Amino acid sequence: MLVKDEEPTLSQTPETGREPSLRKRLWVAEHSRSKASRLLLNVATILVTGVFLYFALSNIDLSLAWHALRTSDYWWLAAALGAFALGNVARAVRWRSLFAYGRKPSLAVVSDAMMIGYLYNNIMPARAGEAARVIVLTQRSDTPPVEIVGTVVLERLYDVLAILVVFFAAEPWLPHVSWFGAAAAAAIVLAALIAAAAVLLAVYGDRPLRFVLKPLRRFSLFSGERLERTIDELVYGLSGLRHPWLALEAFFWTIAAWLLTALCAYLVTLSFHLHLPFACGVLVAVAVGLSMILPSPPAAVGVFEGAALIALEAYGVSHSQALPYAVVLHLVNFVPFVLVGAALLHYNSRHPVHTRSAGRSVGGGSSAQE
């Protein structure tokens, strides 16, 4: 008869029953923290989704919503999809621009990894696409994964900052919104943090990163030369903070991407005959973009619609008119990612990278200490 082996407890090791090693204690503590973090994230996701869904579905007249869907002019969706496509081209150029001079992957490879990442963001929770695109770009280029992670982190910072800049620039043409003050405070704090990080890296080079990552030396994975290489790669990945021209180029493309997102949202309002100004598209893009910071389910179902309704409510649009608009806008932002991402996954599986160098040397290109 087979009996399932019991897992060793904290008071025993599998071999001798001696006190467990420090490594095992650290692993058990980290595992416990990880489980608690996942539970907290799941609870937060359920709460956020519930609140946004309640807001989106409250006061809905189904007959009016169905009438809005039936009488809409879907030819405008072709133009909206064009704006959406151009916005993603701008995002791919922006991501590539964040890599250091002389170390940039090709635009085609960057676009491939980005679209597959967006596919996974739309079908899996917890923004799994961010890890997916790091893996794809690592497999299909010579760029080290730590360097890629640095650029992805900067992307998220630039996205939030650009959304807020667009919001404030459009404020004279927007209706009053109660969350303007909170957005202003967030923009000031974020801008101050980015500026402080840029100054620290410019003045002290990689020393702040070495100080922050010093505790990793306790782990065998980051001992000795490996930690030094990780720091050097991360310095390259943060070139968008260290070099002003790189930062300006990336920020320009980020602003362009969000303006095209606003144009897409505005064109969908034309499809539903809402007779709203372009500024409404800006407010929808800002509301949806900021809502993506919150924990949400795959494809941000419910959160996306609720954020769009919050924006349209400022223009006096009823929920019965706004919900069909929000659903169609969400489909415009969802279906292309699934179709293109799945096609690229199939292409990559049929055309794997058979030969790939051991990775670009951290000494290649410009110096990390510039």
Image (cartoon, grey):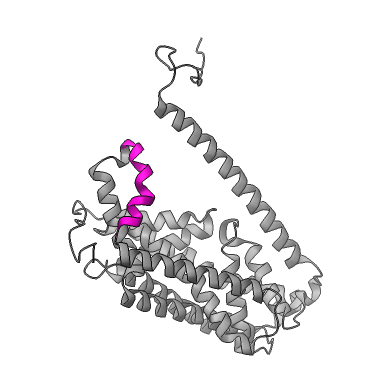
The x and y percentages for residue 330 are: 59, 70
Residue plotted at (26% across, 49% down)? 228
> Quadrant of residue 75 in the image?
bottom right
Query: How many numbered marks does the figure carry?
Result: 0
The vertical placement of 18 against 335, above or below, is: above
261 or 82: which is nearer to us?
261
> Quadrant of residue 35 in the image?
top right
Residue plotted at (67% across, 76% down)? 311
Residue plotted at (40% across, 65% down)? 197
Residue plotted at (35% across, 37% down)? 219
The x and y percentages for residue 231 are: 30, 53
Over which residues does the magenta segment extend?
206-220
68 left or right of 238 in image:
right
Q: Is residue 259 magenta?
A: no
The x and y percentages for residue 305 are: 66, 68
78 or 251: which is nearer to us?
251
Q: Is residue 210 magenta?
A: yes
163 left or right of 111 in image:
right
The vertical placement of 149 against 173, above or below, is: above
Q: Quadrant of the C terminus?
A: bottom left
Magenta residues, dominant SS class: helix
The vertical placement of 369 against 135, above or below, is: below
Q: Residue furthest top?
A: 1
**Residue 350 visible somewhere in the drawing:** no
156 left or right of 69 in image:
left
**Residue 289 visible somewhere in the drawing:** yes
The vertical placement of 23 against 161, above or below, is: above
The x and y percentages for residue 249 are: 35, 78
